[in-house]
Image (cartoon, helix red, strand yellow):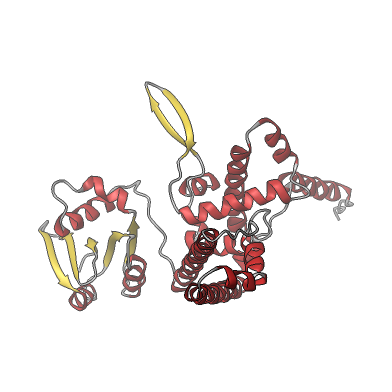
Amino acid sequence: MNAMTFGLDIAKHVFQLYWVDPETGEIHNQRFQRQKLIEFLAQHKGRVALEACGSGHWWARKLMTLGYEVKLLHAKFVRPFVQTNKTDAADARAIWTAAQQLDMPAVTPKTAEQQATLVLHRMREQHIKMRTMMINALRGALYEFGLSFKKGRQAGLAEMRERLAEVEEDVPARMFEALREQFDLIGRLDKGIEGLEGQIKAWSQTQPECQRLMTIPGIGMLTATALVATIGDARGFRSGRQLSAYLGLVPRQHGTGGKVRLGAISKRGDRYLRMLLIHGARAVLFRAKDKGLWCEQLARRRPTNVTVVALANKAARTAWAVLMGNEPYERDHELKKAERAKQTANSALGQPRLQRP
């Protein structure tokens, strides 16, 4: 049969498939159960477009094993093509229509390992939030009994444990038992966070891309693994600026009448990855011994937060260049590249010419 394009709207149990027969022009919009859908698609070939939503990457991998070309679309790019009410049939038709646009950006399907790494990141982030909530709850409860402790997580917890005898005297017995259980829960969360970070680190050691990214100032193990797992293949972006725009680190634009106004950063894309890059840039600004001339000059004339975001933007662009070049980060790369080219040219000029017989 001739290859055709399918628009697939996925859910947990019911799936809507829209396609147009290229030979007869007949329009189909049919509902399938999971197994029936797989059996139907196994009998055809072509291209399948679907939204990059829940289970979208799993379906992309499944369809590629069936021999399909898969195009994952961001949901916000599909929504304008829904003509009337939002239904499964309307969504499938909108996905099919969006896939016909030549300039429609697509999402690179993630591998199972990349998805697993992102799950570990999300679990670690959840553990940290729960630990912070518990520590703040402890501080608030003990402050009601006139007890205050040092600022900071580690210093505060250490002082709480040192003053357990004082706490036991100042609070009721039943409350003290609950506090001890809270301390135990915080300890288990600490171990859980360490275990998740160990798994992420073990994966980073097997990925050459992560090792190269970790040579960039402001990018550590967590940021490198999150970058590799999130963006997948760097060839999906035309330039480092496009990657930076994908992460929401470029100014928002608003233009009319030929005049364009730039605002604050757009904050589009992955919020977690953007947070990691900005924290890494902040560490470079305040803790790095050699920040570089560009960073020092920028910090003198711009506010601190603007400088931090600019460093994060630069780190994202540098990460794209490192991934595309398959080489580790090198400071003043263009200058050193020009010097190496000059040395190569001088050495070539200095070689004796071969005499003709």
Give the number of callouts: 0
Give above or below for 192 relative to 311: below
Is residue 207 among the parts visible in the rendering?
no
Residue 231 in view (yes/no): yes
Residue 61 in the image, given as x and y percentages of width and height? 36, 71
On the image, the x and y values in percent for residue 64 come to: 35, 71
- Which residue is at 70% across, 40% downward? 295
Nearer to the camera, 288 or 38: 288
Q: On the rendered structure, is 352 left or right of 31?
A: right
In the figure, is residue 297 to the left or right of 167? right
Q: Is residue 101 above or below residue 49?
A: above
Q: Quadrant where the N terminus lies?
A: bottom left
Location of residue 293 in the rendering, given as x and y in whole percent from the top left corner: 75, 39
Identify which residue is drawn at 68% across, 35% down: 298
Quarter of the picture containing the C terminus is bottom right
Residue 154 at x, y = what percent?
Answer: 65, 64
